[in-house]
Amino acid sequence: MTSRLHALCFDAHDPLRLARFWAEFLCWETAEDSSDGITLLPSDDTGFRLRFLPTQERKTGQNHMHFDLTSTSLDDQKQVVERALQLGARHIDIGQRPEEGHVVLADPEGNEFCVIEPGNSFLAECGFIGALAGDGSQETGSFWSRALGWPLVWDQDQETAIRSPHGGPKFTWGGPPLMPKTGKERLHFDLAPPAGSDQQTEVDRLVSLGATRIDIGQEDVGWVVMADPDGHEFCVLTPR
């Protein structure tokens, strides 16, 4: 059996403040976290939790993943942006063109996200979190499709997208040119093998699909740190 996506994790200088921002913005609930992080549980069909973990590392460059949030009308898009700003977000410029309809923002720790204009057909069936948009190759999109057992819903011109059979946001990879990697990613996936399975067996399966085991100084921990074909880190937890 394949692992499920347990959480999308954010490294944060102030995990509590960042968790509060996303909890209020998404209307998600806080849950107990077995480590020193903070966990939010979805109130919709997103299918995975958000975890906020302490770090002293400074943010360098643009994140390789960001949320694309949907809107139902121009007024709704404006209201979503205004609500984000009131909670502590800010406008940023990452090179978007004036004629593009989406609004680019950053959360209180500089993590980018977009509020997409209404009428986006690609995200029409998705909820408020329409997509987790990633910088990555076609190979990496195919890897995550097989790793999670999620079907490809787009595979053209080196761009790929997958979506859980149970719904929720699409995960997309935009193809080349890829952004240069400037250090450990501030966002990463936590995968959880199913209860009763074996962590090492799952690690071996992921290696056979194109992942690699890596050392980021994690020392003796219960999870295994790996990287996808583009070198983006993720963790394999103990079965649960």
Image: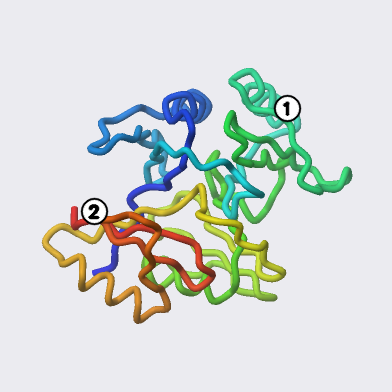
Residue 110 drawn at (x, y percent)? 62, 36
Name the side, left or right, on which 118 lies relative to 240.
right
Residue 138 drawn at (x, y percent)? 58, 74
Q: Amino acid at mark 1?
A: Lys
In the image, residue 184 sits, relative to residue 138, either above or below, namely: above
Between the residue at mark 1 and the residue at mark 2, the CA separation in whole angstroms equals 44 Å
> Residue drawn at (38%, 54%), measured in percent from left and top?
166
Of all residues, the one furthest to the right in this rendering is 98
In the image, residue 37 sits, relative to residue 133, either above or below, namely: above
Where on the picture, by quarter, is residue 5?
bottom left
Name the side, left or right, on which 211 lies relative to 127.
left
Q: Residue at label 1? A: 78
> Residue drawn at (35%, 32%), measured in percent from left and top?
38
Where on the picture, by quarter, is residue 159?
bottom right
Secondary structure of residue under mark 1: helix
Residue 221: mark in rendering: 2
Secondary structure of residue under mark 2: loop
> Residue drawn at (50%, 54%), measured in percent from left and top?
184
Q: Amino acid at mark 2?
A: Val
> Residue drawn at (69%, 75%), measured in percent from left and top?
157
Which of these two is toward me, 58 or 165?
A: 58
Where on the picture, by quarter, is residue 108?
top right
Where's the N terminus, which quadrant? bottom left
Of all residues, the one furthest to the left in this rendering is 196
